[in-house]
Every structure is written in structure tokens, then in C-alpha cells.
Image (cartoon, rainbow, N blue to C red):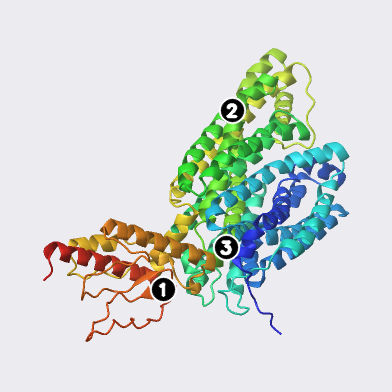
Amino acid sequence: MVRERVNPPVEALYERKWKIFAVMMIGWAMSLIDTSIVNIAVPQLQQDLETDVETVTWVINAYNIVFAVLLVAMGKLADQFGRRLFFILGMFVFTVGSGLCAAAWDIDSLIAFRALQGVGAGMLAPLGFAMTALVFPPQERGKALATIAVVALVSTALGPIIGGAILEITDDWQWIFLINIPFGLLGMALARRVWLETYDLSVQGNRVDWLGMGLLAGAVFSVTFALAEANKRGWDDALILFLLQGAVLLAIAFFLSQRHGKKPMITPALMGNKQFVGANTAMLLFGAGALGALFLLSLVFQNLWGLDQWEAALALTPVPVMGMVVWPVVRRGADKRAPRDLAVPALVVMAVGLMWFSFVPSTLEGWIDYLIVLPGLLLIGAGTGLVFPTINVGAMGAVTGSELGVASGILNTARQLGAALGIALLIATLALASSVTVGYAREDIKNLNDSYNLPPQRAAELSGLSFADFLGRSEARFERRVGFDQHAAREMAGAARDAYGWGFRIAGLLVLLAVPFARTMRHHPSAARSASRAPAVPPAPVPEAATEEERHVSQAAPVGVGAVTGPANGGSRAELEIRIAQLESSLTALRSDVGEATDDVGWVEPPPRSRRPASATDGRVVQLEHAEQQDGEPPADPAPTPAPPRWQSHELVRRDAVARARERKRRRRWPFGR
């Protein structure tokens, strides 16, 4: 027996909004913290599991690749088969995967269990933005989306800090995964208690776009795998070229399947939504620059400055702290200002911060060196804290209820692909720049060796060991002796600093490339929703014979009138009620502009024997036509007219405005009647 899908009243969702939001944040924060919490434990994993760095990095890559592959598909399936069901399933898979990771006996089993953990995260992450946009009323939606975006930002940035604290206290990497288990059990219990099941009722039956999901998963897997392995294998490697070409072909096939398929996963309206497309492109470029730069920051503090895991985590603290400090600015303006008003200046601030940090001192001699880079860290944190939530508000505020899940998946996928692209591109930049800067440093070291008279081969070997330390290419840090070793290390540190600097400059360029796309985010959530739906019901054309005043009144009709459509357009009942209230307010304003007096019920008393079109107020249609007086009999009541659907009220508003303009003009021409 097929279970009937029924959504709860929106009032019930609004009453529980903060409870549902809090439960959602448990799974949301867990899935994002685990994208970076393992980064700080790579050296210990390498030592305990007796493997090399290249293999250990797949503990991170396996999670991130599976996570990115499943985001869009899981968001669509959650819309179709139940969002609460997928949240509980995702929490269960993630919790089981965390326990298995802690019990892993070798590096291969740990990689496999991390992939399983990524499956659970891929089910959880798309629900964050979707449920936030669903359970909050439109007038509070922007603030809620800004809040969850800041939670995502802080969770990602706190991952290395939490991981460093756990390793400092326990000195055991298993606790990085065991800490997820109690939170997973708590999230599942609370979800069953407070979360109401919701569906996308516009999807008929159990139709699933398996072809589109497969093509998109193949494209995302190919590009993320290629980016993860490109710097290790080389960009001219046959496998890397094959995967990149395959990703392009699969992406084209996915686009064609969505354009011409019978049951596409991504609707044509979503593909044609300029603000949503622009926001996702901005997220891709911003993610590449910002998240790639955060990866480089940890390398600078650990490899170039020689800080340990905990010290490096503390050095990064100003970034998430500054993000939380500027968050109220986004929250206050989320429902009032266009997202681009904050996003564009913040992107510039972020780029300035990256440029500032590109001149980082080559060595850490004391606290003054950290103070030199602190303004750059604060600017990076402020830019990230403003841009990330603003782009999320601009993207998710431009979609309707039936598209929330897949839109959330697309936005998360853009962020993950941006991170993979940024890390791969910046590491490639670091490798290319270091091959140039080390050449200049070796010339200086040759001149330095004239004072020490070491064999040239020995001098090159010692300087090479120092350079490998600064770039993180050595398993153990080289112990330098007083004399030539220290002087050569200082020269190589300067060469490594210059290479890192070019990486931060490229990151700043990627951030600035997001500015044109961020400028497409012209509408805050309420305005964007009206603008995206307006073409659904085009306004009726004004007759060619209409006078100039009639055209003016017709054009003065509410722009968002077309937004009031039937349920097939995906709008919820609450949104329709809000739009109808806006129409009624616009109708009152139009009457005030025309300058005609209204009676207590809001209807104009027309002149005798005049006929006027019908007008809509409070969902009722009243005939404005006086009954004829017959032989002393009282006028008969007008015959009741059946009320049309409320979504047709926009046409009635326009006709009423045009009729009033005609009557006003007639009165000016014939002030005493004909």
C-alpha cells in the first residue's frame, strides 16, 4: 500500500521553527566539521598507521568526494520521499561511519569507512538550507539563512581547532570520530520528537530522474578525483586528462538530459533563474579562493613558521571569530537589502586581506611577526563572514518551496567543487612558483657558500632539505646547525614565502572574479521570490486605443501580481495569503492615487446608470451595477456572482484601475453629466 504524502500546515512548521532549526544544526555542523577536522591529524595518522602522506590524504579526499557527489541527488530524493526520513537516515549512516572509523585497523579500512561517513554527510548537508527556508516565514527567511550560513562557516573553520584540541588532550586520533556518536544519537532522538515530515508534492508518484543523478554524480566524481590527484600525478597524466575530459562530456550530457528529459531533476525555471545561477557561480569562485586560502594558511603556520598543530589552530582563530563578529550586519540586512549590497564590498575586503597576508614574514621571530599578518587575517575573516551568508541568502531566497532541496544541494555542491578547485589550483601555483623562487635562492646560497667553503653538492643538499621543510614535502623536520644551515634556511624560507605569496594572490584574484556574478543578486528573499514568479502570469495587454492616462494606471499595477499563481507553481498557502494581502494593499494605494472616495466596505459609489467592472476585495467579487428602478418597486438585490479563484485577482485589480481612470476622465469632460 502506497503511503499518502501530506504536508503539515505551515502554521505548525512556523510554531516549531526554532526547534527544527536546532536539530538541523546538529547534523549540519557535524557534517561540515568533519570536512576539516581530520586535516590536523594527518601527521599522527601517518605515524600510527605506518603509511605515507599521499595515502593519508585519501582519508580526507574519500570523505569530500563522496560528500560532493551525493549533495544534489540526496537533496532531490529528500524532497520527494520525506526530509525528516532522510535526516534520520543520514544521521544513522554518519554515526555508524564515525564508529567504524574509530575502529579502523589499517589505512585502507579507514579510507573505506570515511567514504561511508561521507554518504551520511551527503544526506544531511542538503537539508540545512532547504529546511531553514521551509520552516521560517518569508519575513524571517533572510535572517535564518544568514544564521545557518554563519554556522556553516564557523563549523568549517573550527574543524582544525577542535581536532587540535582533541589531539592535545587525548593524544589519540580515534576520539576525533568517537565524539560524533553521542551527537548523532541525540540528533536522531530529537528529530523523531520535534520534526514534522514534509514533501515536495509537485512530484507525482515515485518518479526519479536516475539518469540525471547518474550523469551528475559521474561528472562531480570525475572532476573532484582529478583535482585531488592532479598535483601528485601531474596535470599531463593520462588518467587526469581522461577524467577531466569525461567530466566535461558528462556535464554536457547532464545538461541535455535536464533540458529535454521528461522528468528532469532540475526544473527549467531553476536553470533560468538568473539570481540563483549567478549566486552559485559566485559561490564556486568564492569557495575556490576562500577555502583554498584557508588551506594555505594552515600550511604557512605549520610548515613555514614551524608551529605545532595546536599553535597553528590558535593562529587561525581570528578568521572564525571575525566571521561571527560581522554576522549581525548580515542578519539585520538580510530581509531588507539586496544581497549584492553586502557581497560586493565584502569580496573586495576579502581580496585585500589575502593580498595583505601574501607579504607574510618568512620566519617567526616573535609576536611582532604575528601582529604583522593579523590585519590580513581579520580582513579575511570579515570578508568570509559577510560573503558566505550573503551568497546563501541570495541563492536560497530566489527559489520556491518545490525546489528547495535540489537548490540546497546545488549550492552545497558549488561550495565543495570550489574548495576542491581552489586547493588544487593553489597547490599547483605553489609548486610552479616555488620552482622559480628556489632558483634565485640557490644563486644567493652559492655566494653564501664562499664564506663557508662547503662542497657545492653538500651545500645544495642542505638547502634543499630546508626548502622541503618549508613546503611540507618532508616527513620529519630537518634539524639545522648554527652557521651555514641557518643562513641557508633563511634564504630558502624567503623563497618559500614568495611561493606562498603567489598562492594567496591567485586566491584573491578568484575572489574578485566572483564580483560580477555577485552583482546579479539584486533582490532580497521576498523581492526575489516575487520577481522570479512574475512571468508566470503575464499582465493583460492594454488596448491600443487606450489613452495615455489609462496606460499609466495600467502600468502602475503591482509588479508582483503575477506571483499569485495556483498551487501548481510550487508556492505554499501561506505565501499565497501574503501575496493576496499585498494585492489588497496595492489596490488601496491605487484608489488613493486616483483620488476617489470610498465607502465603508471599500467600494466606489458610481454615478447613476453607469456600469463598472467587477473588483476584488477580501476574496469576494461584488457587481458594481445599480439595479433599475421599476414602477416604484424597490431596487432588486444584484444577482450573486460566483467568486473566481483568488489567484485571478491581479487581472481584476488592473481592470478596476483602468475603469476608474476612464470614469475620472469622463467626469472632467462632462462635469454636469451628458
Residue type at tag 1: Arg
Query: Residue at image x 51%, y 61%?
Result: 399
**Most foreground residue, 358 or 117:** 117
As displayed, is residue 400 above or below residue 363? Answer: below
Mark 3 secondary-structure assignment = helix
**Most foreground residue, 587 or 321:** 587
Q: Position of residue 218 (x, y in %)?
A: 62, 65
The residues bearing labels 2 and 1 have C-alpha atoms spaced at a distance of 62 Å
Could you tell whether 325 is left or right of 253 in the image?
right
Query: Which residue in the protein does label 1 denote?
Result: 620
Residue 372: quadrant of the picture: top right
Mark 2 nearby-residue class (10 Å; few <14, some 14–19, many ≥20): some
Query: Residue at image x 79%, y 61%?
Result: 189
Q: Which numbered disc, 2 or 3, marks the residue closer to the eye?
A: 3
Q: Position of residue 606 (x, y in %)?
A: 25, 69
Query: Which residue in the protein does label 3 denote?
Result: 404
Mark 2 or mark 3, earlier in chain? 2
